[in-house]
Image (cartoon, rainbow, N blue to C red):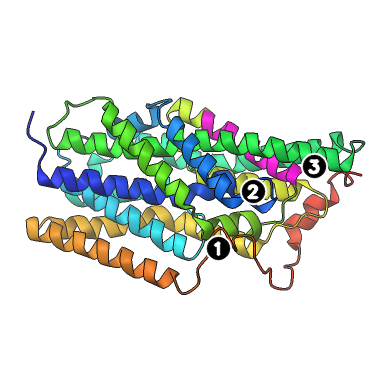
Amino acid sequence: MESFSLILAIVVVTALAFDFTNGFHDTANAMATTISTGALKPKVAVAMSAVLNLVGAFLSVEVANTISKGLVDEAGIRPEVIFAALVGAILWNLLTWLVGLPSSSSHALMGGLIGATVASAGFGAVHGDVLVTKVLIPAIAAPLVAGLAAMLATRLTYRMGKKADGKAAEKGYRAGQIASAGLVSLAHGTNDAQKTMGIITLALVAGGTLAPDSDPPMWVILSAGIAIALGTYLGGWRIIRTMGKGLTDLQPQQGFAAQTSAATVILASSHLGFSLSTTHSVSGSVMGAGLGRKGGVVRWSTATRMFVAWGLTLPAAALVAALAEWVCGFGSWGTAVVAVFLVSSSAAIWKISRREVVDHTNVNDHDVPGEEPSGVVTQAMAAVSPPPAG
């Protein structure tokens, strides 16, 4: 085995930086509805989510193996290629965080890896069957399945709770939300932390430090779990605001239904080794829960912006990664240029974000301009919804 080279060390550090951005970018997936309904205070919610993300990272390596062994051909992949892939993924994460859009960190990473691989070794180095079956199909199916499950669960919840005491039922649903939010956090650790494990493992194989087809070493699992937990604790408050208040207004019953549905989909996908977007699953379940309550409103202007971001994630990250790989191809100075560009761009995005600070003190202060009208879809769903509880 070769020694741990400088470029390999840079790749590992950059991968953990991506994992950190993944954590604060996706905190909303687990805790947005819990925070928006008041079931947990914001700082308590993100602390709980961080701990469970760390625990979840140790539960499985199936998704990590999909990335390190399945998506691209390990032969011919250099560490510089993986570095370029991470540059595309990190910059897309930061840009969507800046504007508060819950896009997919998973697909940003997949797009970056595909773009850099194609730029380095051509299209033949990407395993198209794995891309379709374990990335693209789950990307479409996950929000639909989670959304439908959450809508049906919401309707069932309201119907079963018609005769329940209002305050007692609400208290019970808040407790249920806390439990289901914990389950989503655990599921997020089993899925998203593994993606970074897979990327680091692929880099170690490419650098000759690990044998091909190796599973992630324990230090990789531990460091990826800690990085995503720290990012989660930091709290992606901008995206939490969008997910919790910008898409729809949720009551505790809806929050419980949304989180339980999303957690079920994510855990099932992790078991099957699907590189699922937890963002897609949770966003779909939130919208489904919004449609499931009579009189509930899904704000389709926000949802449309989110759908556009979803569609752009793979190609945008791929394009940036391909350009980064092209520059890295000029040698050490090219890699240095890309590294400086990544650091300076990240610093600029952070500085811009300070113009309007969103944190745990104002995350629920969301002004909905003029209460957006229901729209055709919401009206149609409301027409066949059960009467409100009470």
Q: Is residue 250 above or below residue 213?
A: below
- Residue 71 visible in the current orientation: no
Left or right placement of residue 380 versus residue 223 in this view: right
Q: Quadrant of residue 218?
A: top left
- Tell me the quadrant of the picture where the C terminus can be found: top right
Instruction: Specify start and end residues of the magenta stretch as a single range.
Output: 252-267
Q: Quadrant of residue 205?
A: top left
Residue on which disc 3 sits: 170
The kind of residue tagged 2 is Thr
Left or right placement of residue 35 versus residue 187 in this view: right
Q: Nearer the viewer, mark 3 or mark 2?
A: 3
Residue 348: percent from left, percent from top: 33, 70
Q: Earlier in the sequence, mark 1 or mark 3?
A: 3
Residue 48: percent from left, percent from top: 54, 40
Give SS at disc 1: helix
- Tell me the quadrant of the picture where the N terminus can be found: top left
Q: Residues within 10 Å of mark 3 (few under 14, many from 20)?
A: some
| Residue 305 - label | 1
| Measured Cα–Cα span from mark 1 to mark 3 | 32 Å
Give SS at disc 3: helix
Q: Nearer the viewer, mark 1 or mark 3?
A: 3
Q: Is residue 107 above or below residue 300?
A: above
The answer to if 260 sits in the magenta stretch is: yes
Residue on which disc 2 sits: 33
Q: Are marks 1 and 2 in contact (CB under 8 Å)?
A: no
| Measured Cα–Cα span from mark 1 to mark 2 | 20 Å
